[in-house]
Image (cartoon, helix red, strand yellow):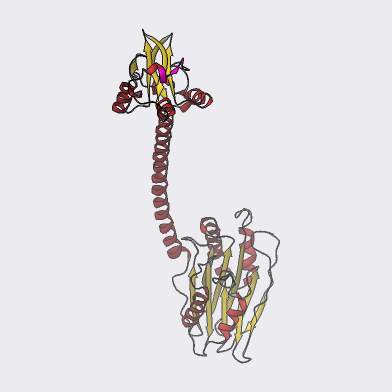
Amino acid sequence: MSNLNDITVGQVMMTDPIRLSSDRPIQDALDLMNLHRVGAVLIVDEGKLVGIFTERDFLRRASTAVPGWRVIPLKEWMSPNPYTIESDTGWENALSSLERLRVRHLPVVDDGRVVGIVSARQLIGKRAEHLKGAVDARMSELKQANDALLARDSEMSHYMKAAAKLQRKVVLPHAPPDWDEISLGVYYAPLDALGGDYYDFVQPDEDHLGILIADASGHGIPAAMVAIMARFAFIEVSPKTLSPGEVLAELNVRLQELIDERFVTAFYAVLNRRTRKLTYANAGHPLPFHWSARRQEIQTLSARGFLLGINPEEVYREKCLELEPGDRLCFYTDGIPDSMNERGDSFGSDSVREAIAAMPPDTTGKQATDNLVGLLKEYRGTQKPIDDMTLIMAMVK
């Protein structure tokens, strides 16, 4: 579409205006103006423009006119020697002239010859037409762009769903190990199709079970890629040693310079099924909870260590715990306590502790997980999650 300022009077004007001689009666002019639905006629004598008669000229005089005014010659009521404009005048200058001269019509004259008439209504109508055309063209462009985005979004959604399916099938374990000594339950809920949380179970030998929970900072595709890198490193390192500290240290080294500005928290514990001894180490992860059936109290597994992928020299010190029948372990990522209700209040770690302590003695790992997740969803109400969420409950038999 052409620029509005490039439009000239010649493109907008009426090229065949009504012309009457100055001695014609006023009624003739009114009849022709009504017939052709125009607001002005040009007064031309012997080929020369001598005046213009407009609706405004008529209204200005009709209220005080004497009887018989209909046959009065136009020269009595016309505006003589009207302002004129040339056909090559630009649209903006033409409209400016109408406003400056305080008229609604201008005869168009080229080289002393009348070639048309232009009105404010024509110019404003052309502007409306131009703006409508510009809007239509822009809307068409936006529709095309939106259609392309929708198609791209559909394609990306398809790829994301496929990637999420692959992550769940290949990266995450299908089900926790079925051991007589411990009952395990898992809840995994990424915020997006792909999640940055990662958990895993490993059996270095027939007497030991390793439990890992990790969280790559952020969520979505970048966090998921970091979690996948951590997983590949873990499955290679964990079968080689029963030391949680050594596993975290090796993961830390392997993740150096691979995760850019991101980081990973992780907690790794190894359980001896014969002695029920739990050895664990922490890399900046939220502290898991341990419910002691004998003491009827809950405490945290308080090993400390720095985040993975930051300091290649970090040493992850281990701690040990003798588990007893009836004990409960809760491993989680921060999406669990950070979940909010409609008021913006966080679920909090205290609510997690209370839920663990209130569970019946014969609760299975799955029942414990379902129970805690149910409380969490009830607390959130209609509020959506704000982060990936992973929960592992381990009930010692």
Q: Residue 145, image x and y in percent?
A: 42, 42
Q: How many marks?
A: 0
Q: Nearer the viewer, residue 110 or 393?
A: 110
**Residue beneath the point at 53% across and 87% down:** 359
Q: Nearer the viewer, residue 147 or 92?
A: 92
Q: Nearer the viewer, residue 360 or 239?
A: 360
In the image, residue 374 above or below residue 263: below
Task: Give the magenta range.
Answer: 76-85
Q: Residue 244, image x and y in percent?
A: 62, 72
In the image, residue 112 above or below residue 258: above
Snapshot quadrant of residue 275: bottom right
**Residue beneath the point at 45% across and 26% down:** 104
Snapshot quadrant of residue 238: bottom right
Left or right of residue 201: residue 277: right
Q: Nearer the viewer, residue 265 or 87?
A: 87
Does residue 283 belong to the magenta stretch? no
Q: Residue 164, image x and y in percent?
A: 44, 60
Does residue 84 belong to the magenta stretch? yes
Characterize the magenta stretch by its predominant secondary structure. Answer: loop
